[in-house]
Image (spheres, rainbow, N blue to C red):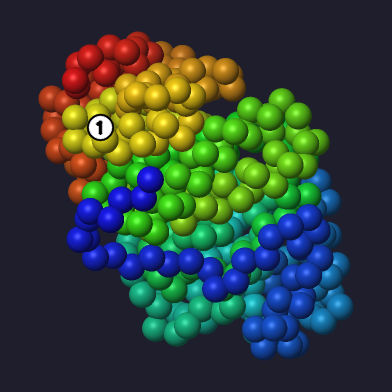
């Protein structure tokens, strides 16, 4: 059910074109031509895994029919400031007509910076935070090879500066077009499939709890939740199942659209986890998700019951049921369930709560985030006690 109760005003951004379907990447040169990028040099920004798997050829070869193609393929894991600066310099060495981001969220996020900084002066640090670019970024096509980050639909570029999460945020970073080709995700191993799929689920459920949620983001959130609940386990267990791969690459995109409402406490907690125990972003977000649901139950119990109804059979399901379902899904997929599981020490909890409160505030969260409530959150998460967290915040 889509709610129209809120009178909140918000802008919703999305790519201007989405190409979806088996083999869609083969048409990338035609897409650029349709946007009047008819010749010149195109820069592909890709991660090393894409190159190793040979997926880069699925994009590079069609482009060669119309364009000179250069590649920057130095993205490994979470991109650092040094990587972003090297890429910016590379993007400024030649005149480019367009940029193509190919890979997971890190590669696509870096392609956004390449498109923007190729057309603008200044250092990467000049644009950290909410920003704007004087000159319009180059046309950018995003081609995800994982199914979860939703970076192909967002206005954010994430990077790591001195081991801490940082963002560049601008409406100008939203890609011109997204290419959703499920064939590019067939080689994803089960653990990556699980982690990125849980990332999409986190985006949807957190956006659904956000005070900035609106009918547009609610529509995307419900679609994402429903698809992930139906197809993620199948995609993990049978990576060759094309129907599951089609479903998950679509859910990743709609999960990205959800982010127009912003995320809530779970992402802030995830950052404090990643700053201590390096792991995929989707895993840290998933770990925090059931506790975030419990934390916010008093404020948005009705909305969480609606979300629960889309993933659980039967009537009269509640947000409590939803939190427990998420916890069970995480366990089923082999993800860590507690902070103890990933080596976080109990003595770290106070510092994590303080960092979450001061460094990663979430005004979008429907429940006020206080030091005392955060302490309970982290204590329950340390033990892996979702039920206890539900009872503590009931």
Q: Is residue 23 left or right of residue 89?
A: right
- Is residue 54 something that shows in the picture? yes
Quarter holding residue 135? bottom left
Seen at 51% across and 44% down, the residue is: 224
Identify the element where label 1 is drawn.
Answer: helix
Q: Is residue 375 left or right of residue 169?
A: left
Quarter holding residue 92? bottom right
308, above or below 130, in the image: above
Q: Position of residue 284 (x, y in %)?
A: 45, 32
Seen at 23% across and 14% down, the residue is: 391
Seen at 48% across and 31% down, the residue is: 311
Q: Determine the residue located farthest toward the front in the rendered image.
A: 315
209, above or below 100, in the image: above
Quarter holding residue 72? bottom right
Q: Is residue 75 left or right of residue 330?
A: right
Q: Position of residue 211 (x, y in %)?
A: 24, 49
Q: Which residue is mark 1?
A: 301
Q: Nearer the viewer, residue 172 or 306?
A: 306
382, above or below 199, in the image: above
360, above or below 35, in the image: above
Q: Nearer the viewer, residue 44 or 21?
A: 21
Q: Nearer the viewer, residue 34 or 215?
A: 215
Q: Position of residue 103 (x, y in %)?
A: 66, 53
Considering the image in quadrants, where does the C terminus appear? Answer: top left
- Is residue 277 something that shows in the picture? no
Seen at 40% across and 19% down, the residue is: 324
Considering the image in quadrants, where does the N terminus appear? Answer: top left
Q: Position of residue 326 (x, y in %)?
A: 45, 25
Q: How many numbered marks appear?
A: 1
Residue count near mark 1 (Cα–Cα under 10 Å), binned few <14, some 14–19, many ≥20:
some
């Amino acid at each position: 059910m889509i709610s129209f109760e809120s009178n909140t005003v918000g802008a919703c951004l999305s790519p201007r074109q989405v190409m979806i379907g088996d083999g869609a990447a083969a048409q990338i040169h035609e897409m650029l031509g349709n946007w009047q990028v008819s010749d010149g040099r195109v820069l592909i920004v890709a991660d090393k895994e894409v190159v190793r798997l040979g997926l880069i050829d699925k994009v590079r070869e069609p482009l060669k029919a119309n364009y000179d193609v250069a590649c920057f393929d130095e993205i490994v894991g979470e991109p650092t400031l040094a990587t972003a600066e090297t890429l910016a310099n590379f993007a400024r060495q030649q005149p480019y007509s367009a940029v193509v981001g190919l890979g997971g969220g890190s590669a696509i996020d870096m392609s956004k910076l390449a498109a923007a900084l190729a057309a603008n002066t200044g250092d990467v640090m000049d644009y950290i935070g909410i920003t704007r670019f004087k000159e319009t970024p180059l046309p950018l096509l995003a081609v995800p090879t994982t199914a979860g980050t939703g970076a192909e639909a967002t206005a954010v570029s994430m990077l790591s500066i001195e081991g801490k999460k940082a963002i560049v945020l601008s409406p100008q970073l939203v890609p011109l077009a997204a290419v959703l080709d499920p064939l590019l995700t067939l080689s994803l191993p089960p653990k990556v499939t699980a982690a990125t799929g849980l990332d999409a689920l986190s985006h949807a459920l957190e956006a659904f709890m956000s005070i900035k949620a609106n009918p547009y983001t609610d529509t995307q959130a419900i679609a994402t939740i429903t698809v992930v609940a139906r197809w993620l386990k199948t995609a993990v267990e049978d990576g060759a199942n094309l129907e599951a791969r089609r479903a998950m690459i679509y859910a990743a995109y709609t999960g990205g659209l959800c982010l127009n409402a912003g995320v809530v406490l779970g992402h802030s907690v995830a950052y404090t986890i990643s700053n201590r125990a390096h792991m995929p972003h989707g895993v840290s977000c998933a770990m925090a998700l059931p506790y975030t649901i419990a934390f916010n139950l008093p404020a948005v119990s009705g909305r969480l019951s609606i979300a629960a109804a889309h993933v659980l059979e039967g009537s009269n399901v509640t947000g409590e049921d939803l939190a427990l379902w998420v916890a069970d899904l995480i366990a089923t997929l082999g993800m860590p369930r507690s902070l103890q599981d990933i080596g976080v020490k109990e003595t770290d909890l106070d510092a994590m709560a303080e960092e979450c409160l001061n460094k990663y505030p979430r005004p979008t969260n429907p429940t006020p985030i206080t030091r005392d409530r955060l302490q309970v959150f982290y204590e329950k998460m340390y033990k892996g006690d979702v039920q206890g967290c539900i009872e503590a915040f009931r």
